[in-house]
Amino acid sequence: MMAALAYALIATDLDGTLLRDDDSLSSRTRSALSHARVAGALHLVATGRPVPQVVPVLRALGHRGLAVCGQGAQLYDAGADRIVWSVTLDREVAEAALGKIEAEVGAVCAAVNQDGTDGLMLMEPGFTVTHPTLGGERARRRDDLWVRPLTKVLIHHPGLAEDALAEVARAVAGHLVTVTTAGPDAVELQPFGVTKATALALAAERLGTSPEATIAFGDMPNDIPMFLWAGHGVAMANAHEDLKAVADEVTLSNEEDGVAASLEHLFPARTGTNDPTDPTERLFPTRA
């Protein structure tokens, strides 16, 4: 008789958490997830990335199930290659929020993530991305950002750090949009009330599991709702202090394979139960 699982669902953020800083996925982490899967646990990616930027990672993981994308605005079925649930941000609401923010801090640079499995990241002049592999297409002017339904707006300010800009955005536009920070590049404006926990709860219901049976890993304030929803929240050593304040545990950094370190204690390898299948290693960078 098999022992009951400590956690039936493993929810992991990607950037700064599951992935290393160069966007690689270590063999140790893939192995730890494989052992958890063999033990009977489900793995769910929960990321701020929109669907098109998540698909290569899911392929590398051999993942064919659900994934929370776009900060919870999208629930994606990798096996069917379709979005099964999504919430879009109204253009007029987005423009009103931007107007209120710019009235306080001056001009910001904006970008958007379009909805859909083929949605683009469009960036107005002046918006920059420092991520090693993610980027977008350049729009000529702000009006061009609204040509298709979108899941979020990203903004940055030439003179304000992300935490300071987010504080202002919440104060003046928090009644219109959900404001969060997910990394050093930008503050994000999402549909009001939408967080990673929104789609994670829906995914868990579809998978027949519960918050209490979920362990979540993350590194930034956008992971706070997910931690508050899940039964156990694990912050990376490199995590934002706001996330560490609500975490149940702090593991090693993403560069030190902190997710793997935690999972190895919960789901130790058992002789003869290795799952060596990773047919897409060649499609995604890995490091030992």
Image (cartoon, rainbow, N blue to C red):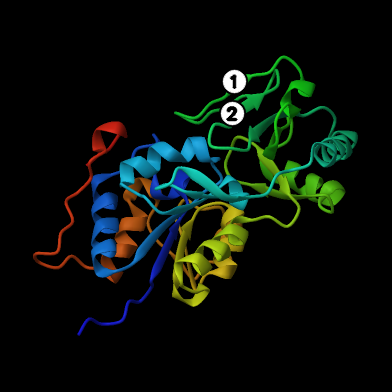
Please tell me in which quadrant of the rendered image residue 188 appears.
top right
Identified by mark 2, the residue type is Leu
For residue 161, side relative to residue 258 (left or right): right
For residue 2, side relative to residue 61 (left or right): left
Kindly identify which numbered label has been placed on residue 137: 1
Query: Would you place residue 93 above or below residue 285 in this image?
Result: below
Give the quarter of the figure containing the N terminus.
Answer: bottom left
Query: Would you place residue 227 above or below residue 191 in this image?
Result: below
Q: Position of residue 42 (x, y in %)?
A: 37, 63
Per the image, the residue denoted by label 2 is 120
Q: Earlier in the sequence, mark 1 or mark 2?
A: 2
Q: Are marks 1 and 2 in contact (CB under 8 Å)?
A: yes
Q: Residue at x 57, y 56 (%)?
A: 223
Give the quarter of the figure containing the C terminus.
Answer: top left
Question: How far separated are the C-alphas under marks 1 and 2?
Answer: 7 Å
The residue lying toward the viewer, choosing from 238 and 142, is 142
The residue lying toward the viewer, choosing from 111 and 259, is 111
